[in-house]
Amino acid sequence: MIRLARSLGYSCILAAAALALAADELEVRVERKRDVFLVQAAVPVAVDPATAWQVLTDYNRLAEFVPDMRVSRVVSAPGEPILLEQHGESGFLFFRTEIRVVLRIEEDPLRRIVFRSVGGNIERMQGEWRVVRDADAIRLSYRAEIEPEFWVPPLLGDAILKGHVEKQISGVVKEMLRRYAEARGTIVPSGRSTP
């Protein structure tokens, strides 16, 4: 029993260390060109490509582990191109904005998800998620061009979007690590990620 308790304790410590390491290594860059935001992010994650892919394509459950996302659901019929409706909120202090978007999704299994907006209050949103095997882990990258239909404060916009992307990717990474550990019988703290 003592051996089991120690083993579980070590598993929790290792899981917490993996989460902290991933958060420390998350790189997010946001550049604004007129009304368009260019976003690039990357982070190493100690999971296999299958686990990463399982989380990224769990479209109907994304709102359960991605901060500030309230709704995520596939609205297309089976066999048709994937249309993903998402609702959420972004902002800073007193400036909060409701975000609604419908994305058309194209998948290159275990490698890449390409998306582009076809509806919502985002004038244009297109980009991709990539999963690249890196030794015994993966490198997760995200790239997007975002042109909102709503006003974004000139001096705060970059920082607001950067913080939003960091929180959301951290939520995705946390879920990847949780599922990977769960599949291997180790324990990772669960629950919705918070800022």
Image (spheres, grey):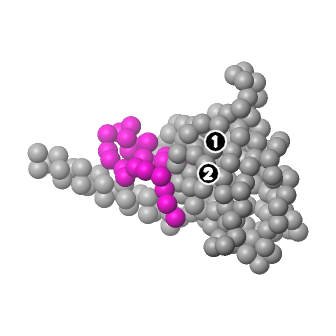
Mark 2–mark 1 Cα distance, whole angstroms, equals 7 Å
Residue plotted at (49% across, 60% down): 194
Q: Position of residue 114 (x, y in %)?
A: 74, 42
The residue carrying mark 1 is 72
Find the residue positioned furthest to the left: 1
Q: In this view, does 80 lie above or below 155?
A: above
Foreground residue, 66 or 53? 66
Residue 83 on image: x %, y %: 74, 34
Residue range of the region highlighted in magenta in the rendering: 172-195
Q: Is residue 181 magenta?
A: yes
Q: Which amino acid does label 1 sit on?
A: Ser
Which residue sits furthest top? 79
Task: Name the secondary structure under disc 1.
Answer: strand
Judge whether 87 appears above or below 183 on screen.
below
**Residue 97 placement (x, y as % from top left):** 72, 61
On the question of residue 138 being in view, the answer is: no
| Residue at 73% in and 75% down | 156
**Could you tell me which quadrant the N terminus lies in?**
top left
* Residue found at x 83% / y 42%: 118
Total label count?
A: 2
Q: Is residue 155 left or right of residue 3?
A: right
Q: Is 68 a magenta residue? A: no
Q: Nearer the viewer, residue 164 or 69?
A: 69
In contact (CB < 8 Å): disc 2 and disc 1: yes
Residue 161 left/right relative to 188: right
Report the residue at 76% width, 41% height from top. 103
Q: Can residue 165 be seen in this view?
A: yes
Q: Which amino acid does label 2 sit on?
A: Met
- For label 2, the residue is 69
Q: Residue furthest bottom?
A: 155
